[in-house]
C-alpha cells in the first residue's frame, strides 16, 4: 500500500481530536435546540430567559463550522505533503534510470503519471481519511447518546445502518473497475495527444494529420465515455444512500410518534432530541460514502503509480574517485550492452590513448552511438569493463566524471531560454566575457550578429528555432566554456553546408587540443585525420587501425569507403 505510510501519526491524532469535538458540538446543538423550543412552546419562557441558551447555540454552531473547516485544512495539508513526497518518488524513479533509457517511451504518459495520477491521490488524503475518522467517531457518539435516551430508536439505527456500508462496498467495487478504465483512457489520451503534437511536422508531411485527428477524437470520446461511466456509478451511489437514510429516518419517526402519542412511553423533548440527532447519524454515514467513492479513485491512481514505481530500474552506480591525469586514457574490455534480447554492442575491446583522436565508423545501426553512450556512462555496461586511467569507470564520482566530459550529440537539446543561458548552463559561474569567448570559439558570432537581441535572443521551445548546425554550435560553445578533457562527438549524418561543417571541424579540433576526442564519424576527412579508427559491424569491432592500413586489409572498411565513391564523398553511413 503506497498511500497509507504517507500520512503522519500526528495527522491521525489531530483529525481524531477534531472529530471528537465535532461529535460533541452536534450533540450539544441538538440538545440546545430542544431545550429552547421546549422553553418557548411548553414552558412559555420569556425571550430574555432563553437568551443565554441562544448565545450558547450560536457558539456551538460556530464551533461546529470551525471544526469542519479545521478538518478540511488538516486534510489538505496532509494531501499536499503526501503529493509532494509522491512526486519526488516518481521523479526520482524516472531520473534514477540511465538518461538514455529514461527518455524512452511516451513522454505524455510520464507527464500524466507525474501530474494527473499523483493529483488523483489527493482525495484519499484530503477527503477519504478525514471523513473516515469523522464517520467512525461521530455516528458512534450519536448512537451512544440515542441508546441512553430511547433504546428502540438505537436498535432501529443499528439494524438499518449496515445497509449503507454494504451498498458502499458493492458500488465501490463497480467504481474501481470504472475508474481504472477512466485512468487508462486518460493516460492513452494524453500520450497520444503529446506524441501527435511533437510529431506534427512528420504527420503533415506524410498527409496523416486527418487520420491522427480522428484517432485523437476517438481517444477523447473513449475518455469521455469512461468519465460518464464513473459519474453514473457515483450518482447511483448517492441515490441509494439517500433512499436508505430516508427510509430509516421514516421508521424512527414512526416509532417515536407511536411512543409519544399512543403508548406514552417517551417525552416530547426526548423524541425531538432523537429526531434531530438521527439525520446527523445518517449524514455522517453518507459523507463517508462519498469520501469512499473518491478514495476508490485515489486507490486506483495509487495502484497505477505503484506499478510504475515497482518497474525494475537499471540503476547506474558511482564511486568517489576522480581522474588522476588529464586528458585520460580509456580502455574498453569486452564491453557488451543490450536494449532488449539481442545485444547492440558485443564484446567490444579497444584502447583509446590519452589525448588521441578516435573515430568510430560503421553502417547505420552498427551500434556506434550506443558505444558512445556506454563510454559516456549514459548507459550501464551489461558485461565487460571500462577503465579510465586504470580506474574502473564505476569507481569514479558521478560529478567528477561528468565535469570532465562534453558530449555533442547529433541533436543537442536546447532549453527554452536565451542563447546566453543555454551556453552558461555548462558552467554557471562563467562571466559574460567567458560566454562571449566560448560563443566566438564555437563559431556562433555570425549568427549572434544577425540577431537583434544577440546572445540574449530567446531560443528553444517558445523562442526562435535553430538549425541542426546552429544547435551543435551552441553545444560546442557549452563545451568551450567547460574545457573538458574528454569530448564525445556524434557527427551529423545529414549534410551540413560546407561552411558550417568547416566551422564545426575547426572548433572541434581546437577544443580537442588538450582532450581525448572520440567521434562517431561519417565524413572522409574526419576519418582520415583520426589516430585510430574503430570499425563496427552489427555491434562488434571488426577492425582497428589507421586509414591507410584499414583500407588495404579490412573488408568492412573497404566496403564502407567503397560506398563513398573513392573516399571522396561525405555522409556515407
Ligand atoms: N533506445 C533504444 N532501444 C532499443 N533499441 C535501440 C535504442 N537505441 C538504439 N537502438 C537500436 O540499437 C541499434 C544500434 O543503434 P545506434 O544508434 O547505436 O546505431 P548507430 O550505429 O549509431 O546508427 P546511426 O549511424 O544510424 O546513428 C539499432 O538497431 C537501433 O535500432
Image: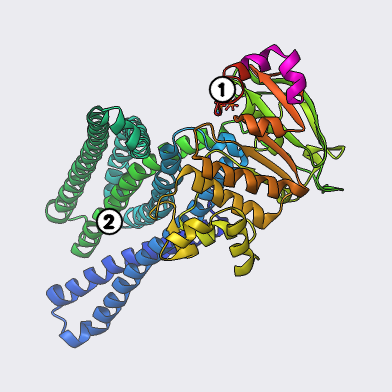
What residue is disc 1 on? 364
Question: Ligand 1 lies in which image quarter?
Answer: top right
Q: Position of residue 569 (x, y in %)?
A: 56, 26
Q: Tell me where the magenta segment starts and ends, as one range.
A: 546-560
Residue nearest the viewer, comparing 116 with 59: 116
User: In the shown orientation, is residue 277 left or right of residue 508?
Assistant: left
- Callout 1 environment at 10 Å: few (<14), some (14 to 19), or many (20+)? some
Does any portion of residue 170 appear in the rendered image? no
Q: Does the residue tagged 1 have its C-beta within 8 Å of any atom of ligand 1?
A: yes
Asked if residue 558 lies in the magenta stretch, the reply is yes
Picture quadrant where residue 52 is located: bottom left
Q: Residue at x 30, y 31 (%)?
A: 205
Q: Give the mark, 2 or 1, whose residue is nearer the N terminus.
A: 2
Image depth: mark 2 or mark 1 in front: 1
Q: As displayed, is residue 261 above or below residue 240?
A: below
Task: Assign the magenta stretch its main secondary structure.
Answer: helix
Q: SS for tag 1?
A: loop
- Quadrant in which the C terminus appears: top right
Count every numbered label the image shows and give the total. Answer: 2
Task: Classify 67 as above or below 345.
Answer: below
Residue at screen point 57% across, 18% down? 563
Q: Is residue 549 magenta?
A: yes
Among all residues in the image, which is located at the extreme top?
555
* 417 lies above or below 286: below
User: Is residue 473 toward the left or the right of residue 539 in the image?
Assistant: left
- Tell me the crowding category of disc 2: few under 14, some 14 to 19, or many 20 or more residues within 10 angstroms, Cα based: some
Residue beneath label 2, please? 280
Amino acid at each position: 500500500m503506497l498511500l497509507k505510510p504517507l500520512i503522519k501519526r500526528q495527522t491521525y491524532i489531530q483529525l481524531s481530536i477534531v472529530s471528537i469535538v465535532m461529535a460533541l458540538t452536534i450533540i450539544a446543538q441538538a440538545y440546545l435546540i430542544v431545550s429552547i423550543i421546549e422553553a418557548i412552546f411548553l414552558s412559555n419562557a420569556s425571550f430574555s430567559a432563553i437568551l443565554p441558551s441562544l448565545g450558547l447555540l450560536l457558539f456551538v454552531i460556530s464551533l461546529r463550522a470551525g471544526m469542519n473547516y479545521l478538518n478540511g485544512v488538516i486534510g489538505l495539508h496532509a494531501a499536499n505533503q503526501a503529493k509532494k513526497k509522491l512526486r519526488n518518488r516518481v521523479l526520482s524513479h524516472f531520473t534514477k534510470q540511465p538518461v538514455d533509457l529514461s527518455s524512452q517511451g511516451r513522454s505524455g504518459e510520464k507527464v500524466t503519471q507525474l501530474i494527473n495520477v499523483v493529483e488523483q491521490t489527493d482525495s484519499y488524503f484530503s477527503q477519504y481519511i478525514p471523513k473516515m475518522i469523522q464517520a467512525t467517531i461521530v455516528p458512534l457518539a450519536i448512537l451512544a447518546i440515542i441508546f441512553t435516551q430511547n433504546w428502540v430508536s438505537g436498535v432501529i439505527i443499528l439494524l438499518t445502518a449496515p445497509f449503507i456500508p454494504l451498498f458502499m462496498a458493492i458500488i465501490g467495487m463497480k467504481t474501481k473497475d470504472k475508474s481504472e478504465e477512466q485512468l487508462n483512457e486518460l493516460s492513452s489520451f494524453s500520450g497520444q495527444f503529446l506524441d501527435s503534437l511533437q510529431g506534427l511536422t512528420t504527420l503533415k508531411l506524410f498527409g496523416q494529420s486527418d487520420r491522427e485527428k480522428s484517432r485523437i477524437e476517438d481517444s477523447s470520446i473513449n475518455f469521455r465515455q469512461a468519465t460518464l461511466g464513473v459519474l453514473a456509478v457515483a450518482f447511483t451511489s448517492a441515490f441509494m444512500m439517500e433512499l436508505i437514510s430516508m427510509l430509516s429516518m421514516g421508521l424512527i419517526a414512526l416509532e417515536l410518534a407511536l411512543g409519544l402519542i399512543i403508548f406514552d412511553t417517551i417525552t416530547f423533548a426526548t423524541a425531538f432530541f432523537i429526531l434531530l440527532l438521527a439525520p446527523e447519524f445518517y449524514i455522517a454515514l453518507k459523507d463517508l460514502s462519498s469520501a469512499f467513492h473518491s478514495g476508490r479513485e485515489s486507490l486506483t491512481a495509487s495502484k497505477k503509480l505503484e506499478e510504475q514505481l515497482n518497474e525494475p530500474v537499471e540503476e547506474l552506480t558511482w564511486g568517489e574517485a576522480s581522474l588522476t591525469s588529464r586528458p585520460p586514457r580509456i580502455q574498453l574490455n569486452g564491453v557488451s550492452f543490450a536494449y532488449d534480447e539481442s545485444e547492440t554492442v558485443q564484446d567490444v575491446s579497444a584502447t583509446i590513448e590519452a589525448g588521441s583522436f578516435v573515430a568510430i565508423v560503421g553502417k547505420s545501426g552498427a551500434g556506434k552511438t550506443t558505444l558512445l553512450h556506454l563510454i559516456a556512462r549514459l548507459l550501464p555496461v551489461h558485461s565487460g569493463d571500462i577503465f579510465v586511467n586504470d580506474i574502473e569507470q564505476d569507481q569514479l564520482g558521478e560529478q567528477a566524471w561528468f565535469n570532465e566530459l562534453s558530449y555533442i550529440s547529433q541533436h543537442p537539446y536546447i532549453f527554452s531560454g536565451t542563447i546566453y543561458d543555454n551556453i552558461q548552463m555548462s558552467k554557471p559561474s562563467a562571466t559574460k566575457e567567458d560566454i562571449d569567448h566560448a560563443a566566438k570559439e564555437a563559431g556562433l558570432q555570425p549568427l549572434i550578429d544577425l540577431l537583434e537581441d544577440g546572445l540574449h535572443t530567446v531560443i528553444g521551445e517558445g523562442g526562435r528555432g535553430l538549425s541542426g548546425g546552429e544547435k551543435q554550435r551552441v553545444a560546442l560553445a557549452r563545451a568551450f566554456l567547460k574545457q573538458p578533457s574528454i569530448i564525445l562527438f556524434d557527427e551529423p549524418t545529414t549534410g551540413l553546408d560546407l561552411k558550417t561543417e568547416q566551422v564545426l571541424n575547426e572548433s572541434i579540433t581546437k577544443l580537442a587540443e588538450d582532450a581525448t576526442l572520440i567521434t562517431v564519424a561519417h565524413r572522409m576527412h574526419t576519418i582520415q585525420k583520426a589516430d585510430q579508427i574503430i570499425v563496427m559491424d552489427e555491434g562488434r569491432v571488426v577492425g582497428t587501425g589507421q586509414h591507410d592500413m584499414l583500407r588495404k586489409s579490412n573488408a568492412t572498411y573497404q566496403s564502407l569507403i567503397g560506398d563513398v565513391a573513392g573516399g571522396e564523398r561525405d555522409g556515407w553511413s
